[in-house]
Amino acid sequence: MMEDNLIIKTHNLTKRFPMGKSEFTALKGIDLSLGKGEFAGLIGPSGSGKTTLLNIVGSLDTPTEGEVIVLDQSIGNLTAKAAAKLRKEKIGFIFQSYNLLAVYTVFENVEFPLLLLKYSANERKKMVMDALEWVGLLDKIKQKPPQLSGGECQRVAIARAMVKNPALVVADEPTANLDAANSHNVLLTMAKLNEELKTTFLFATHDEKVIGYLKRKIYLKDGKVDKDETL
Amino acid sequence: MKLAIKLAFKNLIGAGLRTWLNVIVLSFSFVIIIAARGILVGWDRQAKNDMTDWEIGGGQYWNVNYDPYDAFTLTDAHGAIPDEFQAEIDGGNMVPVLITQGTLFNEGRMLSILIKGINPDQRLLELPTQKLDTLVDAIPAIIGSNMASTNKLQPGDYVTIRWRDKNGTFDATDICITDIFTTNVPTVDLAQVWIPLENLRSMTLMPGEATILTFRDKEKVREDTENWKLMTHKALVSDIEEMIKTKSVGQSIFYIILLILALLAIFDTQVLSIFRRQKEIGTYVALGYTRNEVVGLFTIEGAMHAILAAVVGAIYGIPFLAWFASKGITLGVSSADYGFAIADTMYPVYSGALVIGTTIIVLLATTIVSYWPSRKIARMNPTEALRGKLQ
């Protein structure tokens, strides 16, 4: 893999959480590299450390030890402001429970990251419509999340993550709340975006349906990389 | 900031009924504070106007020995009027008043009174002194309605008064009540009898003398003169200002309680919001907000209650306050009970400073109670907030 194509690189990544008087080690010296355009997943049972790793890569958390470079920035050394800037400009998030803003319409939810990036109203409108077209929700722009199905909500979340054309999308159990048909629909959408826009996707999952779509499978077990398979 | 305001407004409107309940309670605070303070401002203005019209004009000169709170000083509180004031007196722009202590005998009772001599031709004060220019077979006198009702006196009644002249000799004569005037200024009414100045001068053997010189022009630059102390208009109304200030403190307690209730509701809403909207907070952080920016967003959201309350308050408050200002409020108290000018019906006055000041106070208080619970967000772990995990 070419160095200048690296999106994520971790070296000896360790994360410990305080647990009463002792500590719990969630990640134990992870070494990992992820290149541009990868469609990879962190696979493992609950407690294997996949969400913790995803949060650190997404600059929502910091490592206890080791180094994590995401898009040329060292996550451990970022100030809160710099981490927020990295998330705002370059990372898209997709969550298990969608995390849409309930009082906003579909359009406004997708528009939100662009408001933070201070795009003009015309630019925002075009970009939001494009994103909603990718996920096939142009007919729902005026609806609010409570009026949508789970699958539709997750597609809105995908559009929100993709609208700013981020370099990296992290998705934590994106199909956990969806039925089989919706899961495939959502995964197809993400695979298509990965193909067309060359956006790097990193999933955390233990869902077989997701695993079937992954081009790279990184198996975690007890906070360590157990197996790393590339198709 | 612009974005935060836009988002805060959207979130606030999106919160529905809870927002409107808070806004309505807070708007009550706005309207009641402005209405209540308007009464005090109106009272202050009315009291000063009445005092100006009836008693103090544009200011006074007092004989150096005069102390209105010590009747014993009256024996010496008189003197010849300086020549420099004669032109003003002749032009009707200055009114001399001679004051002496006396006793009124009526229906077998004795009442200590102040006998005040004033020129019947004066038009500087509202006192109906022209009624002193009446031909009766005693000294004509006018009294206020409180004095009349306390002593059961009516126009046409004759009563005896006693006084001491300059040399300390007692003398007595009858007076005839030629008019009873109604005023809100008790200091020209209670226990006072107004008679023609020249009569009193002659009774007390004090020709050409006076105790007080009331002048018309408030703006004219003046200074103390020999034996006469300048009392400016501002100094003479300072007692009213002190009294209003005291009343204002007492009244403030009432609307501070109301404001606290409204602020408690907003505080409660903020606490609940932060508890219920953890996922949303985590989402803001994931989308690129810093935690401090989210604190700012929630604080603006809370503070915006005050802005909405000002708008809602204006919708029903402006017509209500306008009606209130035109109808006034009748408190059913007498100026005699208060010891200074108070009208039967008081008309509130709302100044721009009052409205703007109240708005700023409520906005600041709301911002503080909104910020207080929002600080908790700064300590939140965004990864736990995203999962909606209780903290």
Image (spheres, grey):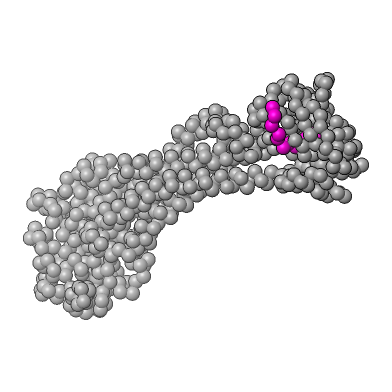
Left/right of residue A122 with respect to residue B200 in the rendered view = left
- Which residue corresponds to the image point at 25% horizontal and 62% vertical from the top-left? B391
Q: Position of residue B18 (x, y in %)?
A: 32, 43
Q: Compared with residue A41, is residue B146 higher up or lower down, i.e. above or below?
A: above
Q: Position of residue B297 (x, y in %)?
A: 38, 54
Magenta highlight: main SS: strand
Q: Position of residue B131 (x, y in %)?
A: 78, 23
Query: Residue A6, located in which quarter of the rendered image?
Result: bottom left
Left/right of residue B111 with respect to residue B283 in the rendered view = right
Query: Residue A94, located in which quarter of the rendered image?
Result: bottom left
Q: Nearer the viewer, residue B239 or B218?
A: B239
What residue range appears in magenta? B107-119
Left/right of residue B267 with respect to residue B213 in the rendered view = left
Position of the N terminus of chain A, as image quadrant, is: bottom left
- Which residue corresponds to the image point at 60% horizontal and 37% vertical from the top-left? B337
Q: Nearer the viewer, residue B43 or B279?
A: B43
**Residue B236 among those drawn in magenta:** no
Q: Compared with residue A122, is residue A63 higher up or lower down, i.e. above or below?
A: below
Q: Position of residue B332 (x, y in %)?
A: 55, 31
Position of the C terminus of chain A, as image quadrant, is: bottom left
